[in-house]
Image (tube, grey):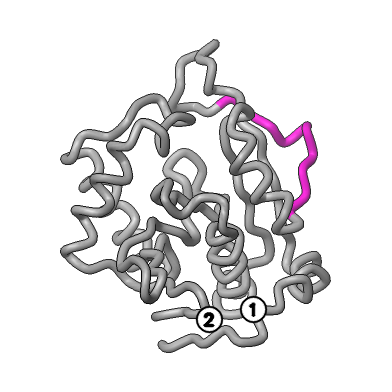
Amino acid sequence: MIMETNRIRLRPWKEEDLTGFRALNADTDVMRFFPAPLAPEDSDKLAAFFQAGMLRHGFGIWVLELPGFSSFAGVVGLNVPSFNNSLVEVDWRLHKAFWGHGFATEAAAVALEAGFSLFSLETICSFTSRLNSPSEKVMQRLGMEHHPEDDFDHPALPFGHPLSRHVLYRMTKQHWTDQRGKFSFLDRLQIHL
């Protein structure tokens, strides 16, 4: 499946994307709200996890292309976290050259639209370390709702780790129906199955 607006394209993985994904995961700026940058073999394992999720669920983490600018700008999509298979999260990770242009918000909105309209999900969440205000601002721009009682300590991090406390935002299908009109680019969304 390929989904595209005038500015972005979300598409399946290709073998050559692993190189771009390794560079993305090795960048200390991109990974500053993660415990550490990823070694190439760990980046490849994460890519394999994302691709396996696509086969298992029909949705997953897609490669973000910016036609005319980059064939690999990052990854965006829907993921079932390994620590809680009752959740579906919208997730994004972009090369820093593409920060600050609204690409994460636009691609995440496309992923939300797919989750609710194509995959009949009822709720999609997003979470990040409470220190990661840039990602939290994307969640807010998407219109996701935050209830502090949903915040949690990430189980993959040791107790007391500076990044362990996570904020969690949610979007319901009904709330998305009310919000999606804010994103005019969705009117021109093309989906190729």
Residue 141: x and y in percent read 72, 55
Residue 1: x and y in percent read 39, 80
Front in this rendered view, residue 48 or 142:
142
Q: Is residue 54 above or below residue 168?
A: below
The quadrant in which the C terminus is found is bottom left
Please tell me in which quadrant of the rendered image residue 17 appears: bottom left
Instruction: Pick whichever of labels 2 and 1 is earlier in the sequence.
Output: 2
> Can you see residue 125?
yes
CA gap, disc 2 and disc 1: 7 Å
Q: Residues within 10 Å of mark 1 (few under 14, many from 20)?
A: some
Q: Residue at x 68, y 65 (%)?
A: 122
Residue 187: x and y in percent read 67, 85
Q: Is residue 180 left or right of residue 120?
A: right
Residue extent of the magenta highlight: 144-153
Give the amino acid at mark 1.
Answer: Phe
- Look at mark 2 in the image and give the residue it sits on: 6
Q: Residue at x 59, y 66 (%)?
A: 106
Residue 105 painted magenta: no
Q: Residue at x 50, y 49 (%)?
A: 85
**How many discs mark residues in the rendered view?**
2
Residue 15: x and y in percent read 17, 64
Residue 185 — which label?
1
Q: Residue furthest right?
A: 178
Residue 147 painted magenta: yes
Give the amino acid at mark 2.
Answer: Asn
> Can you see residue 88?
no
Answer whether labels 2 and 1 touch (C-beta < 8 Å).
Answer: yes
Please tell me in which quadrant of the rendered image residue 151 appears: top right
Q: Is residue 102 above or below residue 3?
A: above
Q: Residue at x 41, y 38 (%)?
A: 30
